[in-house]
Image (spheres, rainbow, N blue to C red):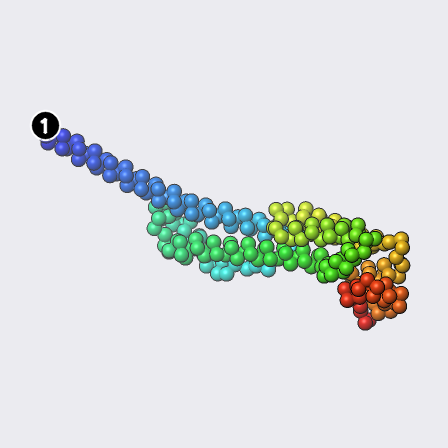
Amino acid sequence: MLLERASRLAAKITEYQKLKATADEAEQFQSRANQLTTVSDKLSRTRISLKNMREAGVTVDFVPADGMTLADRAKALRAAISNNPSAVNDPPFNIKHEFLDRVAAINSAAERTITASWKSYVRRRADFGSSDVLDALNAIPQFRPSVSKIRQCRNAVEALGNSLPVDPKATISSLNTLVAEHEKSWSDLSAEDISSDVVKFIRDAASDGASLTSFSEEVKKWLDARNLTAAFRIRLK
């Protein structure tokens, strides 16, 4: 009787050990699967973001460092797992340091490059120059409504450049609209009791600089009277 009980107990212990080993192996499989899935999902999202940016006309200069080596390792890992699923826990290389960490680093570098490229694109498209002129004009009550519109456009454009768009084409369409509104607000700048020559000088100075010939005595007196002369740029050509 005692021997039978001992035999049954030994069998239960053996079965338990098998089940535990199976459970441990399953846990290892799940852990490895989670690691691979996390890296794969991030890489997929970054690839889509890169594709969308380039299709929208935003130049993104990015080449993954040692990409071919990592691609070869991915193929080797896939082949090993196909032949023996347990290979996922005993790969032909250090899967964390030689694959997962390096792929994650490439993904992070790509994300930074895409973000920097987008911000650069927005800055080039909306090179509005210094806000000094706006600050100066805001001191003139007649110009405040126009200044307010111009600042609204600039703030909206800045907001677009601060975050990576999900849909670059749609966001660029919004950017085009804002840039057009900004230009129109400057072209509509006017005041009934301010000389047209003064208004023209201000518009020109706000873009690429007013010409020296437009800096007439009338304009000079108007600016000097309001301590605004230093706020404007004049082109010598």
Residue at the (21%, 37%) spot, across then down: 14
- Disc 1 marks which amino acid? Met
For residue 222, which quarter of the picture? bottom right
Q: In which quarter of the image is the C terminus?
A: bottom right
Q: Quadrant of the N terminus?
A: top left
Extreme residue toward the top, this view:
1
Q: Is residue 94 above or below residue 83?
A: below
Q: Which of 204 and 14 is in front in this view?
A: 204
How packed mark 1 is, by other alpha carbons closer than 10 Å (few <14, some 14-19, many 20 or more), is few
- Say which residue label 1 marks: 1
| Residue 87, position as x, y percentages in the image | 35, 48
Residue 22: horizontal and vertical position, in percent? 30, 39
Of helix, strand and loop, which one carries label 1? loop
Asked if residue 71 shows in the view, the reply is no
Q: Position of 160 compared to 29: left or right?
A: right
Q: Which of 228 and 210 is in front in this view?
A: 228
**Residue reaching furthest to the bottom:** 236
Residue at the image position 81 percent from the left and 62 percent from the top: 226
Camera-side residue: 125 or 72? 125
The answer, for residue 231, to whether it is visible in the render is yes
Q: Residue at x 71, y 48 (%)?
A: 174
